[in-house]
Image (cartoon, rainbow, N blue to C red):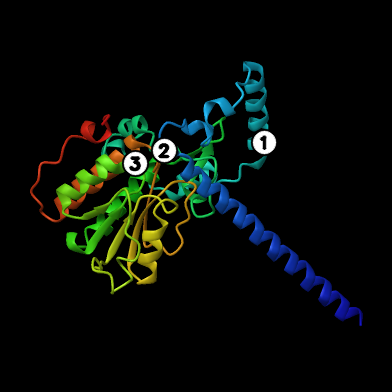
Amino acid sequence: MVDNVKEDTEAGKKAIEKVEGALKGKELERKAEAESLETEAPLGVPKNLGGKKPKQVREKTLEERKKELLEKVKKISKKVDVAKTEELKAKVKVKKKSDMLIPLEEYVKSGIYLGTKVVTPDMKPFVYRRRADGLAIFNTDIIDSKLKEGIEFLSKFNPEDVILVCKRQAGWKAAKMFSQLTGIRVFTKKYPAGVLTNTQLPDFFETELTIVTDSWLDKNALNDTLKVNKKVLMICDTNNFSRRVNQVIIGNNKSPKSLGIIFYLLTRGYCKAKNIEVNVPDLDWWTGEE
């Protein structure tokens, strides 16, 4: 009888832990998605207000802001649970600046290393610290390594077998140029649901690889690609999950400069690997203002 009670107690504890874990996972997903959607606020509404109009937000005093920032710093110092710098250094091969795809300074200027406040378990190994404001910071050596892997992976496919999906407006300029130079089809403002899965649609087509700019904004294309068991190359910020993805490129996928660098390097590397003779604009064009 006692043994049975113990077994029931243990089973109950495990069940509770499982439920709590699921709830935490859902809450993490909710916060992660919110960070991606926040950058796509309607036109005319300040993005830093989370979609609210100015008159709905009370102006905070300098003292209140200072107090909030200090409280956040205290919380962050207790809750930071990311890989240590030393551990990352041990995993990443020591490399000279000349080995990088572009100079380190260009990566830094673009803000490609800036993540979000939410860090998913999938992205935790690529983060080595947080700033005082709570933003997670990517390791630039790993960013460069993942971009090289991404270029090599993409180069295995022909242009007609690849699509790029980029619903985020910050990436439209660079995504369209990427498409123009490589011959890879791009979907920006809207991805037509079902074009990869519904053979009855007049615009149905088959592809082998989908490049996803942000799994939260481009989730319809991602889900369709996974349904038909095709491959995925995804640009992942710290708030993205990379489950069932074949290859990831890590970096800030919300900034026009950061996305400009990513699409510039993919374009340059892909055209070189495929012997596509085109004039790729200089980096300044990709990271410059529209």
Pointer 3: what residue? 169
Whether the residues at callouts 2 and 1 have beta carbons within 8 Å, the answer is no
Q: CA distance from mark 3 to mark 2?
A: 20 Å
Find numbered disc 3 in the image and state the secondary structure of the residue it sits on: helix
Residue 214 position within the rendered picture, expressed as x and y whole percent measured from the top left:
40, 50
Disc 1 residue type? Lys
> Residue 118's image quarter?
top right
Between residues 144 and 179, which one lies in front from this camera angle?
A: 179
Q: Looking at the image, which residue sits at the far right?
A: 1
Task: Pinpoint residue 62: horizontal percent, then vertical percent.
Answer: 62, 16
Q: Tell which of 42 and 29 is nearer to you.
A: 42
Q: Earlier in the sequence, mark 3 or mark 1?
A: 1
Q: In the picture shown, does residue 190 fall above or below 156? A: above
Q: Is residue 254 left or right of residue 27?
A: left
Residue occupying the far top of the picture: 62
User: What is the distance, in whole Å, between disc 3 and disc 1 at their CAs?
Assistant: 33 Å
Q: Is residue 41 left or right of residue 172?
A: right
Q: Which mark is residue 113?
A: 2
Callout 2, which amino acid?
Answer: Tyr
* Residue at left offset 33%, top offset 52%: 190
Q: Secondary structure at mark 1?
A: helix
| Image location of residue 68, percent across then percent down | 65, 27
**Around disc 3, counting alpha carbons within 10 Å, would you say few (fewer than 14), some (14 to 19), or many (20 or more)?**
some
* Amino acid type at image mark 3: Gln
